[in-house]
Amino acid sequence: MTGTDQAAFRRAVADVPGFVYHNGLRLALLSLLWTLASLPLVTIGPATLAVYVAIRDLRSDRNRIDRGHIWSVLRQNGVASALFSGVPVAFGAVAVTYGVTALRTGSLAGEVVALVAAYVALYVALALVPTYVELARGSDPVAAFRYGVGWLARHPTPALATGLLSLVVLAVTAVLTVAFVLLFAGVAFTLQVAVVETVDDRPPEPATTADAAAC
């Protein structure tokens, strides 16, 4: 991690507790809604995108959730978010299937396929964090995925550290079901949005048409 990335990553992580404290009730509601909306599984992508949009609105100067803005982004990028979310799951399923078969039969080819699929699943999962942030900004899916892959290539260590911290949040909140329902999405997604937007080498974006209309 370069010195610039390290400083930005630390600043982003340090800002998360204060943000969560000041927006606790709204983040708890977002976490609850995300959990309910994700129950069909195929809706995890759009549900995650909606929470990203809401968190970005809370992090803005308005510090409020704009439901109209959320629906606008979902209409534009909801289908893409659903498709994107299925990619790491598909590769993860391939990795597990071939890995289990390789262990049972001792197939070297199966082990190679499992390792490659697991790597692709991890890589795509990490790239989807900045991709979803860009989708939440209102970018089209192709541009958002390019941004996500580019951000991961430029900032691999912050990306991996964010993924590990998200797993820590998952493990801690999963101990108690209620804690997961009310805390996981709000805390983990706040961390992810904060890191991506802080560890960024682009100039601040101008206000979008949707943002201007919401003011």
Image (cartoon, rainbow, N blue to C red):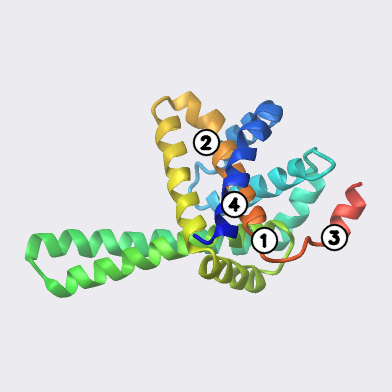
**Marks 3 and 1, the one that precedes in the sequence:** 1
Q: Which residue is mark 3?
A: 208
**Marks 1 and 4, the one that precedes in the sequence:** 4
Q: Are marks 4 and 2 in contact (CB under 8 Å)?
A: no
Q: Amino acid at mark 1?
A: Leu
Q: Which residue is mark 2?
A: 184
Residue sitting at x 61%, y 64% = 80
Q: Which residue is mark 1?
A: 135
**Marks 1 and 2, the one that precedes in the sequence:** 1
Residue sitting at x 60%, y 73% = 146
The span from disc 1 to disc 4 (Cα, nearest Å) is: 26 Å
Residue sitting at x 46%, y 51% = 161
The image position of residue 15, as x and y in percent, is 65, 39
The span from disc 4 to disc 2 (Cα, nearest Å) is: 25 Å
The image position of residue 82, as x and y in percent, is 56, 59
Q: Which residue is mark 4?
A: 7
63 to the left or right of 199: right
The image position of residue 81, as x and y in percent, is 59, 60
Q: Amino acid at mark 3?
A: Thr
Image height of 178 relative to 129, above or below: above
Q: Secondary structure at mark 3?
A: loop
The span from disc 2 to disc 3 (Cα, nearest Å) is: 29 Å
**Marks 4 and 2, the one that precedes in the sequence:** 4
